Image (tube, rainbow, N blue to C red):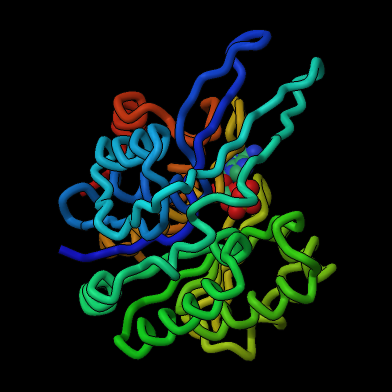
């Protein structure tokens, strides 16, 4: 059985049901990836979440959500007098979604400060793949960033496969230079990079495939998957690049977590032995299921049923 560790923040989500009424659930970029990864890999993999939460009832409910999704919570530290972050989704009369966040003091910001030595040791010795994102980095307190890079260094020395998603949220960084320097570190350590065209446009001011390829060329990255929503993707592995078309999806309802579920699909497919293009195709099918539904996480029974309908193999 392989061990995958996903690091970052999961928040409580309030999505509108009717005027003044909200449905409560849990979501966050890397959490979404962890959920779909575990659903696809089932007993073939142990998927763990590395974060920190509080001891309040919402934190408790989040731990239960992890348990329901069969995600290992042993690396989730519970901090006294702290809380998890939250966000609320507003939909305008025109159907445009906007988000209000309360995450400035969430427990996840100090994940590394509170990771015990014993947990850290275990994590380093048993992890096969470690997954994090630009958001996982952005939210960390300064001390935790330092500790994070120390951990990554140790993971790299232990030959752990490092995977990074370029998710860039300008509001979470002091300025672009800060984000650029952290991303550079991430590129240095990563074996696999999921790069979003939009992220690169916002952060570096370029989003063309060849510009992204050139930017990442100096780093020793085994696989680069450049995503661009409904448009073609570019994949680069062992110096060879190829363009892969994205199959059209007729009924796009909500693209929240398209990238997160795509990444889960890709990593699951690679683990099942797929070639890179076949893994991309598989991942796009998973994302297609997710974007035909509201919210980041499709209910498990529905997800299983749809995956079966389109003959998506899982473990
Ligand atoms: P990110 O959230 O990382 O920016 P993207 O929006 O690029 O991710 O989407 C990730 C993947 O989800 C795409 O590569 C594609 O496979 C699928 N996808 C996203 N939006 C659409 C869409 N409108 N139609 C079809 N597939 C889509």
- The answer to whether one can see residue 172 in this image is yes
The quadrant holding residue 68 is top left
Report whether 69 appears left or right of 294. left
For the view shown, which residue lies furthest in the front direction? 81
Residue depicted at x 59% and y 67%: 141
Residue depicted at x 56% and y 26%: 14
- The answer to whether one can see residue 282 in this image is no
The quadrant holding residue 99 is top right
The image position of residue 189, as x and y in percent, is 50, 83
Q: Taking 135 as reference, is 24 above or below it?
A: above
Q: Taking 143 as reference, is 64 above or below it?
A: above
Residue depicted at x 29% and y 36%: 64
The image position of residue 138, as x and y in percent, is 63, 63
Q: Taking 204 as reference, is 267 above or below it?
A: above
Report whether 252 appears left or right of 161. right
For the residue pair 226 and 73, the one nearer the viewer reads as: 73
For the residue pair 302 and 32, the one nearer the viewer reads as: 32
For the view shown, which residue lies furthest in the right direction? 205
The image position of residue 75, as x and y in percent, is 30, 60
The image position of residue 31, as x and y in percent, is 43, 48
Count up the numbered dots. 0
Residue depicted at x 61% and y 73%: 142
Report whether 257 appears left or right of 63. right
For the residue pair 52 and 274, the one nearer the viewer reads as: 52
Q: Taking 195 as reference, is 308 above or below it?
A: above
In the rendered image, the quadrant that contains the N terminus is: bottom left
The quadrant holding residue 94 is top right
């Amino acid at each position: 059985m392989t061990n995958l560790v996903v690091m970052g923040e999961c928040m409580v989500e309030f999505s509108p049901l009717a005027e003044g009424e909200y449905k409560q659930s849990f979501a966050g970029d890397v959490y979404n990836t962890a959920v779909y990864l575990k659903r696809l890999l089932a007993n073939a993999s142990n998927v763990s979440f590395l974060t920190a939460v509080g001891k309040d009832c919402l934190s408790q409910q989040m731990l239960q959500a992890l348990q329901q999704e069969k995600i290992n919570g042993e690396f989730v530290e519970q901090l006294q007098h702290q809380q998890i972050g939250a966000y609320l989704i507003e939909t305008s009369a025109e159907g445009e979604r906007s988000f209000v966040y309360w995450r400035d003091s969430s427990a996840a910001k100090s994940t590394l400060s509170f990771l015990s030595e014993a947990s850290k040791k275990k994590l380093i010795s048993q992890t096969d793949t470690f997954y994090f994102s630009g958001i996982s980095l952005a939210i960390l307190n300064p001390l935790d960033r330092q500790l994070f890079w120390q951990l990554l260094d140790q993971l790299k020395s232990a030959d752990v496969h490092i995977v990074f998603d370029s998710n860039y949220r300008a509001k979470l960084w002091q300025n672009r230079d800060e984000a650029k320097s952290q991303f550079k570190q991430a590129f240095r350590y990563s074996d696999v990079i999921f790069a979003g065209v939009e992220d690169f446009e916002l952060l570096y001011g370029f989003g063309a495939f060849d510009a992204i390829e050139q930017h990442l060329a100096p780093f020793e990255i085994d696989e680069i998957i450049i995503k661009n929503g409904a448009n073609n993707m570019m994949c680069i592995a062992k110096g060879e690049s190829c363009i892969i078309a994205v199959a059209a999806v007729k009924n796009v309802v909500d693209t929240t977590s398209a990238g997160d579920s795509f990444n889960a699909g890709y990593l699951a497919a690679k683990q099942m032995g797929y070639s890179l293009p076949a893994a991309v195709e598989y991942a796009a099918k998973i994302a297609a299921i997710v974007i035909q539904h509201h919210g980041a996480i499709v209910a498990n029974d529905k997800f299983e049923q749809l995956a079966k309908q389109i003959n998506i193999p899982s473990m």
